[in-house]
Amino acid sequence: MIFKISKILAIPIILLSFLFDTNNEFNNVNANVKKSPANKNDLDLYHGMGVSFLCNATRKGFDLDFPKTLNVASATFASVVSQKHGGKIIEKKKEQPVNMQQLQFIASLQLVESALQVCPDNVPKKIEKQFKIETERLKKLQKM
């Protein structure tokens, strides 16, 4: 009886050991892969997904809090760039590391700008006003 049980358990244990060995090898291979920086197409995709999420989550019927939803969308944008692309983007044909807080801030502004075009009724007036103030401030800083 004990022999039968041990025979029955032996096969799954052996298969599991192969699975864990393969999984460790896979992890070692992935750990050595250089992450490519996010290019324009990647950034456009993440931006489009963020705007879609923002507009869908804040539309009538869902009515999620716009600032919180914007924060989630922009944080997700920055997180994907950080995790998938090693925190680097291609800008002016050069690989550039980016500050994640700055990236999240810029992503927020770009998401609000797109939301104002795609789903303007979802954007609270306070956010729209704050967006205009920040974009003017950035324009002045760029001229310096």
Image (spheres, rainbow, N blue to C red):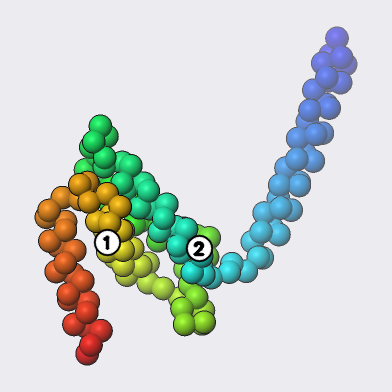
Q: Are the two marked residues, 1 and 2, in contact with CB atoms closer than 8 angstroms?
A: no
Picture quadrant of residue 105: bottom left
Q: Secondary structure at mark 1?
A: helix
Q: Upstream in the sequence, badge 1 or badge 2?
A: 2
Could one spot residue 100 in this view of the protein? yes
User: Residue 20 or 92: which is nearer the viewer?
Assistant: 92
Residue at the location (50% across, 75% down)?
Answer: 90
Give above or below for 11 relative to 52: above
Residue at the location (27% across, 61% down)?
Answer: 113
Which quadrant: the N terminus?
A: top right
Question: What residue would you read off at disc 2?
Answer: 42
The image shows residue 33 at horizontal and vertical percentages of: 65, 65
Which quadrant: the C terminus?
A: bottom left
User: Residue 32 or 110: which is nearer the viewer?
Assistant: 110
Q: Residue furthest bottom?
A: 144
Residue at the location (15% across, 50% down)?
Answer: 124
Circle 1 Cα neighbour tier, 10 Å, few/some/many (<14 / 14–19 / ≥20): some
Spatial distance from mark 1 to mark 2, Cα to Cα?
A: 19 Å
Total labels: the figure holds 2
Give above or below for 99 relative to 47: below
Could one spot residue 79 in this view of the protein? no
Give above or below for 69 relative to 77: above
Circle 2 Cα neighbour tier, 10 Å, few/some/many (<14 / 14–19 / ≥20): some
Q: Which mark is residue 139?
A: none
Query: As shown in the figure, which amino acid type bears the numbered disc 2?
Result: Asp
Question: What residue would you read off at disc 1?
Answer: 113
Query: As shown in the figure, which amino acid type bears the numbered disc 1?
Result: Glu
Q: Secondary structure at mark 2?
A: helix
Residue at the location (23% across, 88% down)?
Answer: 143
Q: Nearer the viewer, mark 1 or mark 2?
A: 1
The image shows residue 103 at horizontal and vertical percentages of: 35, 67
